[in-house]
Structure formats: C-alpha cells, structure tokens
Image (tube, rainbow, N blue to C red):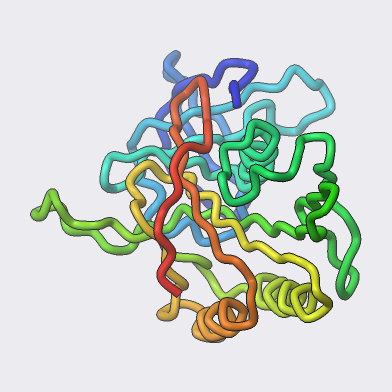
Amino acid sequence: MILTPLLRKATLVRRYKRFLADVILPTGETITVHCPNTGSMKNCIVEGSDCWLLHSDNPKRKYAYTWQLATTPTGHLACINTQVANKVVAQALAQGVVSELSAYPSEGIRTEVKYGDKSRIDFMLEASGLPQCYVEVKSVTLLDTLQPENPDAEYCGFFPDAVSTRGQKHLQELMNIVAEGRRAVLLFCVLHTGIQKVRAAQHIDPKYAALLQEAKKAGVEILAYGAHISSTHITLTTALPVEC
C-alpha cells in the first residue's frame, strides 16, 4: 500500500488523552496531532524519537495531522494507526499474498459484512466450490520479548496490548461460524518490523488467550503475516508463526 500523500517526519514529544500527541516539526514548531489508536501502545513509542505524520487539507479538521508511524524502543518501525491493517490486508488478499486464502478471487472479497451479535466481519471471501470464509483482522504492534544482547533472539509480538472484550467476542463469533460449517480465519496483521512471531498476551488478557486456544481447537484458522514498513509503503509480506 502506497502511503499518500507522503508522510512528514517529526519528533515525538508525548502522547496523552489517548487520541492526542504533541510533536515537533522540522521547522521547530510544536503542534498537537491526532493519535488514531485507542490501545495502550505499549513498547511502541519513545519520547524524542522520529515519527511520521499524515497531513490533511480538510479545513473542518481540528488537527491537520494524523500520526501514522512510530520509532519503537528497539529502533524498529510500527504503524500505530489501527485502521491501516485492514487496508494492507485488503490489498494482500486481492493480490494473493496470503497463500492460505489465495484460492478466493479478488472479485469474491466483501468487506464489513454483518454477522454474529451485531458485529461486522472485516472480510468475507467467496468462490465457486469453496465455503464462505470469514476473516477477522487484528493489528499487532506489541513487542514484549526484548533481548538486545542476543541478536539471534526471536522477538515475539503479543495481542492484545490491553484487555479486549471486543476481541473476546469476535473469537466466540468465529467459533460459531465454524460450528455452522463455514470457514473462519483470524489474521494477525503484524505492523511492527521487529516482530518475528505472534502469541496471545496471556499476561495481559488471560481470557483472550484461553479463548484463542479454544478457537484453534474448534477449527478457527489462526494466521499471522508480517509487513514491510517505510515512510512511503506498507506491504504485507511474510507468514509468521503463531503460538497459541
């Protein structure tokens, strides 16, 4: 996915009130920007580090800039805009990048389809001769196994980064889909360049971790894909191992 308009580099001062952050532009001006992330953003941000912003010309916006990329404590890049995950996955599905789902053609992809208990599935895939496939996408940015002294360490990403009753509900609904004879997939979209595998955050949301194990046993397919991230492109690239 090409990031347009081009992102603008700044220096992070602080994030606060969940939806706001202060940054310093290259001109030296300090401004407030919109932070499009309701999570904790644990281990994602460092005050004084480089960050990248998306500018809007919409005069009705209170804040002209939206924060997109952060430099993490390990020096990696993380996309902190949770809305980007679905856009990246949509492109990957259309291009057949997710090999497990490549049998479904691009014309058979639908988004935001109602299902379950007043929920909307991120993607529904359809193809002749194949079962309907419900795909729920989760953005992963929490790197919680930091071993800088060991360059061969496998850095592990965790989901969720805070207790997620919504995520728990989605797992229950995916299990219901499988019970009805259809296909259900949970796709972890890893938007952190340092993460090499994904695991349920037992230490943060033990109920979610237990439900993830239950969902896997029930037949929900659990996938994870990493991404190439730069100030110009974000592209889903490689399958990563998932430890439930």
Viewer-nearest residue: 210 or 127: 127
Residue 225 in view in this figure: yes
Tell me if 216 is positioned left or right of 135 in this view: left
Quarter of the figure with residue 169:
bottom right
35 above or below 177?
Answer: above
Tell me where residue 223 appears, x and y as whole percent: 53, 59
Residue located farthest toward the front when viewing the structure as drawn = 129
85 above or below 150?
Answer: above
* Residue found 48% across the figure and 56% down from its top: 41
Rendered-image quadrant of the C terminus: bottom left
Tell me if 220 is positioned left or right of 192 in this view: right
* Residue found 56% across the figure and 45% down from its top: 99
Tell me where residue 132 appears, x and y as whole percent: 82, 58
Residue 33 in view in this figure: no
Tell me if 116 is positioned left or right of 101 in this view: right
Tell me where residue 213 appears, x and y as whole percent: 53, 81
Tell me where residue 101 appears, x and y as whole percent: 65, 49
Viewer-nearest residue: 69 or 202: 202
156 above or below 86?
Answer: below
95 above or below 21?
Answer: above
Quarter of the figure with residue 85:
top right
Rendered-image quadrant of the N terminus: top right
* Residue found 62% across the figure and 62% down from its top: 186
Viewer-nearest residue: 161 or 27: 161
Quarter of the figure with residue 72:
top left
